[in-house]
């Protein structure tokens, strides 16, 4: 393979793909008190599991999963039609964002017609296997919902701490729910719903995205039942291009070789379920990583 | 006797007494954040690997965006994030089982910083210390490149601290004179040179009306940097005759050969990992061998500095 150096972009005056381009926010949908979905005026060939880098000029740039594209996701297309929106770029991308720190809080203040920077899509998507079960937790839901839009034969499970944290309830009537406090659906862990569903009928594939310990539990269940699985990892990201090394997990480069990995890869990954690198590239336990 | 084009060309080389099975070295700051990933790059064909530059104390680096690719290369202002020397000792321990030589890259604001880090890392016996005196993305990153006296003092102090571990200052193109700085390094006892680090640059997003990188400026790497790197290696070789790890914009076998002809004994690759993945090391080596066979070059050592006349 010869390197693909994109001199063409630069010479023809178009924006090279790895420089953020400013795109208009078409619509903002409040999913729950902590989470909003943004419809962005940009046409993009993205697949479930891939992510974009979202730039707020002067502040920061952060990775966000693609919730869906107007081409591939009927749910996103429906959102466009409902709001009677006509994007200039003849396509739209949705991202679903939870307020966590300074950048996401600032992003959640944005209104329709505001501009934000986008580059991508990046990363390896989920494989597409019919007759599967997908398990989403928290802001792991967006890529899982995108996948649910594409597959015809699938079962969708969502777990959350409490009812008001749940996402996309009105978009998927057949979705099974669990909450830690029992405020909606099954009281307990979403992995318990997964075991139940596997007992009903063994699926051909299980997809997971959510807290890493949940994904580790899903991996163990799938191994027990000999079902292939794929999970999407979250690590601190800078370049998204596979050079800076911020996102490495074990000996894998999450931004380009992932974020989606299969059961075999996850089992071989020394740090999965255990360690992550901080912003300063110090290896810490997941608990320490998520406590800030 | 077999003709050269039928034999397997000799791609072994040597820098500062370190023997390399391939001249292609992973440049500092590319993927080298942990022992696991460094060992993987080593097992996938690099002749040596360089760790991400290690600083005196923990540092987070700059906000995003801090790396972009703009069509002719990359700009980065990662800002030298580091766990700090005390937190990399465990990784150093694990790197003892690396299949290829490991170069420890070191940075600091003062001579004392460099000496302190080198003394702490010395017991782990890295193959060499590379001195990052050339990062354009930290307030004082280029201070040592500004004067022959200052760089002399740094390199001679580190040489004393490093004992028998070779010391390799890494030069920046952002200097008044590569030959003079290179000569000062040699006079101070440098065992080899690495040339070059990135060149200070900027990309502006005209819709946002702002520089894209959060640090505003960043270091240029990749194809756009190559002719500058070749010139710097040429000048440093001419001025010192020291072995050089020629780095900057190498993404193909032809690029690597060009760097060697400019005077490099080994060739650093960084941004190539974006263009071609980790397999760049194996693929570029294959392309070098093919070129050598077609041009009757039996050994890399034969063509080091071949472009000088
Ligand atoms: C592949 C991928 C997909 C993601 N998809 C979504 C999504 O669809 N929706 C969503 O709400 N969130 C998503 N995230 C998480 C999101 O990137 C962080 O919540 C966000 O970066 C927080 O930034 P902040 O400034 O608000 O908070 P900060 O205070 O800066 O950080 C809070 C926490 O967010 C994480 N984080 C911060 N910066 C980064 C970074 N550069 N890269 C990775 N993690 C970071 C860290 O765990 C950190 O402790 C995704 C992350 C990854 C890696
Ligand atoms: C993302 C990135 C991070 C870098 N970090 C460092 C670093 O920490 N220390 C250093 O000496 N050089 C660093 N460099 C510079 C490279 O080692 C190399 O000198 C430069 O990129 C030119 O080579 P290339 O064109 O092959 O990438 C970095 C380069 C990039 C692209
Ligand atoms: S984010 Fe830079 S290598 Fe993955």
Image (cartoon, helix red, strand yellow):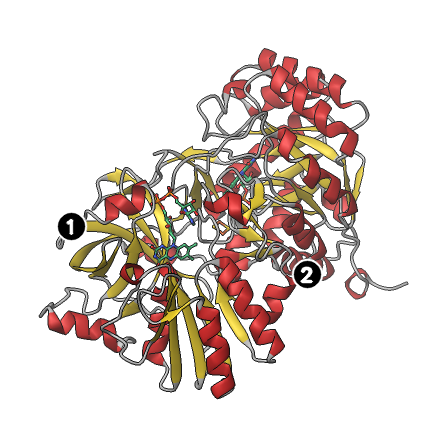
Dividing the picture into quadrants, the one containing residue B201 is: top left
- Quadrant for the C terminus of chain B, please: top right
Instruction: Name the disc covering residue B286, or none.
Output: 2
Direction from residue A27 to residue A272 in the image, left or right: right
Direction from residue A10 to residue B156 in the image, left or right: right
Instruction: Report if the CB atoms under discs 1 and 2 are less than 8 Å apart.
Output: no
Q: CA distance from mark 1 to mark 2?
A: 50 Å
Residue B106 on image: x %, y %: 62, 29
- Quadrant for the N terminus of chain B, please: bottom right
Direction from residue A286 to residue B24 in the image, left or right: right
Dividing the picture into quadrants, the one containing residue A162 is: bottom left
Direction from residue B172 to residue B211 in the image, left or right: left
Judge if badges 1 and 2 mark residues of a common chain.
no
Residue B294 on image: x %, y %: 70, 62
Does residue A50 lie above or below B143 as drawn? Answer: below
Does residue B75 lie above or below A196 as drawn? Answer: above
Name the chain letter of the residue that bears numbered label 1. Answer: A
Q: Residue shown at 47%/61% (left/top)?
A: A4
Does residue A250 lie above or below B204 as drawn? Answer: below
Nearest the viewer among B215 and B26 is B215
* Secondary structure under the numbered disc 1 in the rendered image: loop
Residue hosting label 1? A114
Q: Nearer the viewer, mark 1 or mark 2?
A: 1
Residues packed near mark 1 inside 10 Å, few (<14), some (14 to 19) or many (20 plus): some
């Amino acid at each position: 393979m010869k390197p693909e150096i994109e001199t063409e972009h630069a010479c023809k005056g178009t924006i090279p793909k790895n420089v953020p381009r400013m795109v208009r926010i078409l619509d903002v949908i409040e999913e729950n008190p902590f989470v909003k979905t943004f419809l962005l005026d940009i046409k993009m060939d993205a697949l479930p599991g891939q992510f974009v880098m979202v730039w707020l000029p002067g502040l920061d740039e952060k990775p966000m999963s693609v919730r869906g594209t107007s081409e591939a996701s009927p749910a996103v297309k429906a959102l466009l039609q409902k709001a009677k929106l006509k994007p200039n770029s003849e396509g739209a991308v949705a991202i679903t964002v939870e307020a966590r720190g300074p950048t996401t809080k600032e992003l959640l203040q944005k209104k329709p017609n505001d501009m934000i920077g986008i580059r991508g899509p990046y990363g390896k998507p989920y494989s597409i296997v019919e007759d599967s079960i997908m398990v989403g937790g928290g802001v792991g839901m967006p890529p899982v919902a995108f996948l649910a839009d594409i597959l015809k034969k699938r079962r969708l499970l969502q777990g959350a701490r409490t009812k008001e944290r749940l996402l996309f309830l009105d978009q998927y009537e057949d979705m099974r729910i669990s909450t830690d406090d029992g405020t909606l659906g099954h009281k307990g862990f979403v992995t318990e719903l997964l075991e139940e569903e596997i007992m009903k009928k063994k699926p051909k594939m299980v997809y997971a995205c959510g807290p890493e310990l949940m994904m580790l539990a899903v991996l163990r269940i799938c191994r027990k039942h000999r079902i292939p699985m794929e999970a999407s990892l979250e690590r601190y990201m800078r370049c998204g291009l596979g050079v800076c090394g911020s996102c490495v997990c074990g000996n894998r480069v999450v931004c380009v070789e992932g974020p989606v990995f299969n059961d075999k890869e996850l089992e071989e990954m020394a740090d999965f379920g255990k360690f992550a690198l901080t912003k300063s590239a110090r290896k810490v336990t997941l608990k320490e990583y998520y406590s800030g | 006797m077999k003709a050269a084009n039928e034999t397997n060309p000799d791609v072994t080389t040597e820098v500062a007494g370190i023997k390399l099975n391939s001249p292609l070295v992973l440049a500092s700051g590319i993927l080298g954040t942990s022992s696991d990933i460094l060992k993987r790059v080593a097992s996938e064909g690099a002749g040596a690997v360089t760790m991400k530059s290690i600083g005196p104390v923990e540092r987070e680096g700059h906000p995003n965006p801090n790396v972009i690719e703009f069509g002719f290369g990359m700009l980065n202002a990662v800002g030298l994030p580091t766990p700090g020397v005390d937190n990399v000792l465990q990784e150093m321990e694990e790197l003892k089982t690396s299949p290829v030589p490991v170069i420890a890259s070191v940075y600091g604001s003062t001579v004392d910083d460099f000496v302190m880090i080198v003394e702490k890392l010395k017991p782990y016996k890295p193959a060499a210390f590379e001195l990052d005196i050339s990062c354009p993305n930290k307030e004082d990153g280029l201070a040592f490149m500004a004067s022959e006296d200052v760089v002399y003092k740094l390199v001679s102090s580190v040489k004393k601290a490093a004992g028998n571990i070779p010391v390799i200052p890494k030069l920046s193109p952002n200097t008044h004179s590569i030959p003079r700085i290179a000569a000062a390094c040699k006079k101070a006892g440098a065992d080899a040179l690495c040339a070059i680090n990135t060149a200070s640059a900027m990309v502006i997003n005209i819709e946002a009306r702002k520089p894209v990188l959060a640090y505003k400026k960043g270091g240029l790497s990749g194809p756009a940097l190559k002719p500058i790197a070749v010139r710097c290696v040429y000048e440093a070789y001419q001025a010192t005759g020291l072995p050089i790890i020629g780095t900057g914009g190498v993404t193909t076998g032809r690029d690597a050969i060009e760097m060697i002809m400019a005077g490099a004994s080994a060739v650093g690759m960084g941004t190539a990992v974006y263009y071609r993945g980790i397999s760049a090391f194996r693929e570029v080596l294959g392309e070098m061998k093919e070129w050598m066979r077609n041009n009757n070059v039996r050994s890399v050592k034969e063509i080091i500095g071949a472009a000088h006349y």
